[in-house]
Image (cartoon, rainbow, N blue to C red):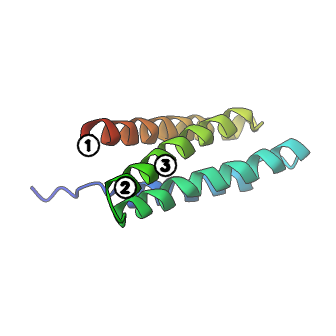
Amino acid sequence: MGEKKYDLEERTAIFARRGGAFVNGLPRTLTNLEYGRQLVRAAASIGANYIEANEALGRKDFFMHLRISKKEAKESLYWLNLVECDRSDSGEKDRLIREATELMNIFGAIIRNST
């Protein structure tokens, strides 16, 4: 009672903001600049596609956007594993990896349980 239902739109937006803040703190290397751009795009796309799924025009559209959200979460994992961070940032990197994995699993479960 009184517990707030966790909003997946909010959760994905928080992930995107945290990903952006993480990228802003990375060492400025050529590879981090490129990997960081890709991470920011993928992280933001998770929530954007989830919002699109919630506004879907039909079942096919709904599932397509959920699959894209799952795919973008997986892509975020890829870029997180490629960026090079200082030891002080490694804790946040690990937390972001865990969150991306959880989001990927959540979208996978929604897809499995809705078909």
Q: Position of residue 4 (x, y in %)?
A: 22, 58
Most distant residue in the right direction: 30
- The disc label shown at residue 69, or none: 3
Q: Position of residue 15 (x, y in %)?
A: 51, 52
Q: Look at 83% across and 50% down and name the residue there.
A: 33
- Locate the N terminus by quadrant: bottom left
Tag 2 or tag 1, which sits nearer the N-term?
Answer: 2
Q: Is residue 39 visible?
A: yes
- The disc label shown at residue 92, or none: none
Nearer to us in this view, 59 or 12: 59
Q: Which residue is mark 1?
A: 114
Q: Look at 77% across and 45% down and name the residue there.
A: 35
Q: Secondary structure at mark 1?
A: helix
Q: Position of residue 20 (x, y in %)?
A: 65, 57
Q: For the residue marked with disc 2, what is the amino acid?
A: Phe
Q: Is residue 25 visible?
A: no
Mark 1 vs mark 3, CA separation in Å:
15 Å
Q: Which residue is mark 2?
A: 62
Is label 1 in contact with label 2 (beta carbons under 8 Å)? Answer: yes
Q: Secondary structure at mark 2?
A: helix
Mark 1 vs mark 2, CA separation in Å:
10 Å
Circle 3 residues within 10 Å: few <14, some 14–19, many ≥20:
many
